[in-house]
Image (cartoon, grey):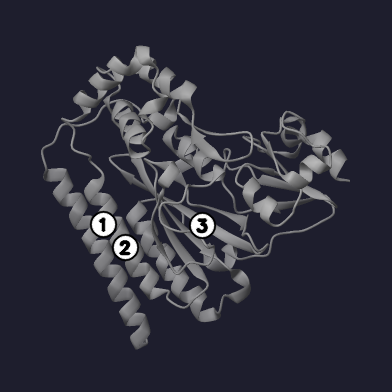
Amino acid sequence: MKSIQDKVIYTILSILIVTFVSYKFMNHNNQRVELIGEPLASFDFYPIETNDVGNIALSETKVNTAITSLDPEKNTRAISELIHLIEENSASFLINNENSKIASSFKQDTLQYQNENDELIEILKNIVGGIGKTLAGSPIEIVLHDTSNPLKSIIAIENPISNRKLNDKITNFGIELIKKYSKNEIRNGNIISYPITLNDGRIVKATTIPIYNNNQLVALICINIDTSKLSHTNKLELNKTINAIKQISGKHEYIDIDELIQPIKEGNEYMEAKMIRYELDKPLLIIKEKQGILACAYINVETCNKTNEACAIVSGVSNYEDMMSAKIIAVSNEALNLGVNVGDTGMSAINRFK
């Protein structure tokens, strides 16, 4: 027999799911001009990139390349997303004089398109709010990212444990996910799980669930769990939550929380996050040596600087060999002190860390 608490949880989540499904039904029956073409993040000139210190920012070069490359007859989706990105971040100053006329025409053209995701985003905010109340008091943070503006991506956050706040940027790893989801490079749009390091050094298990509308990525719901403080009751509630979000997302995999919170293996050479599905389901590696770590781009250099850790970051690798030959795209202050620089290979960084 279910407890009163269980009934309340199921009722809340059921209402949220019904609300979401109702939105989809009404949206399906609404007549509106549809955007066409691939999303902006699927192009090589996607203007959000990681700079030399590991922060994400708008690239002036790529903004202008996008303006001159997108066809208003074939790429209305990407154009709409580009204009939204520029306006939301007051970044029109990045547009070159010779491209300003094209950008103005793009802006006029996009006025005819109602933002097809505005209503859905509001529904998702309510869903995250409801889940946050369900898990109140537990070491489980729920974050909603609007993927249309990675520079101010957090639009809802409940039960915070990571000191993140509204309008914060998405992580470097989040940018990689947006690109890969937009290019359909993550098989079946799978839910993925991976470890992250908080500013105080705690390792937290994170689960990211993509939300789609009309087969286009709209948002990411992230569940961050401080497993050291997770009770048996929390696990049961979280299982129900992940299962409910899975129904909303429409994805095919369900990760059981007992699988999700298995400890990360630690050894002298590396730690491997087995549950991550990143590059064609291959594991993502964190190479750990005595004085520092070499990791893929989901670790933030700012975090390493706050904890005085030496870390070097590479991007787009899927195995040990690739990691050793990949070029470093960002380093922390401690890594610089050890002689590790942007452009070095992973092998060079590991040798410096020993």
- Would you identify the image quadrant in which residue 135 lies? bottom left
The residue at the point 50 percent across, 36 percent down is 57
- Would you identify the image quadrant in which residue 283 lies? top right
- Would you identify the image quadrant in which residue 104 lies? top left
Per the image, label 2 sits on a secondary structure element best described as: helix
Work out whether mark 3 precedes mark 2 in sequence or the reverse, and give the earlier one.
Answer: 2
Proximity of marks 1 and 3: CB atoms separated by less than 8 Å: no
Q: Is residue 353 left or right of residue 279?
A: right
Please provide percent x and percent y for residue 177.
50, 41
Q: Which residue is mark 1?
A: 123
Disc 1 marks a residue whose amino acid type is Ile
Disc 2 marks a residue whose amino acid type is Ile
Please provide percent x and percent y for residue 192.
52, 51
Work out whether mark 1 precedes mark 3 in sequence or the reverse, and give the earlier one.
Answer: 1
Which residue occupies the foreground of this view, 295 or 3?
295
Please provide percent x and percent y for residue 46.
45, 28
Q: Is residue 101 above or below residue 93?
A: above
Q: Is residue 129 left or right of residue 294?
A: left
> How much space separates mark 3 and mark 2, taking CA atoms?
16 Å
Per the image, label 1 sits on a secondary structure element best described as: helix
Please provide percent x and percent y for residue 268.
85, 54
> How much space separates mark 1 and mark 3, taking CA atoms?
20 Å
Q: Which residue is mark 2?
A: 127
Per the image, label 3 sits on a secondary structure element best described as: strand
The residue at the point 53 percent across, 39 percent down is 56
Proximity of marks 3 and 2: CB atoms separated by less than 8 Å: no
Q: Which residue is mark 3?
A: 207
Proximity of marks 1 and 2: CB atoms separated by less than 8 Å: yes
Q: Is residue 50 left or right of residue 267?
A: left
Which residue occupies the foreground of this view, 202 or 39?
202
Let me know if residue 299 appears in the view: no
Which residue occupies the foreground of this view, 145 or 212?
145
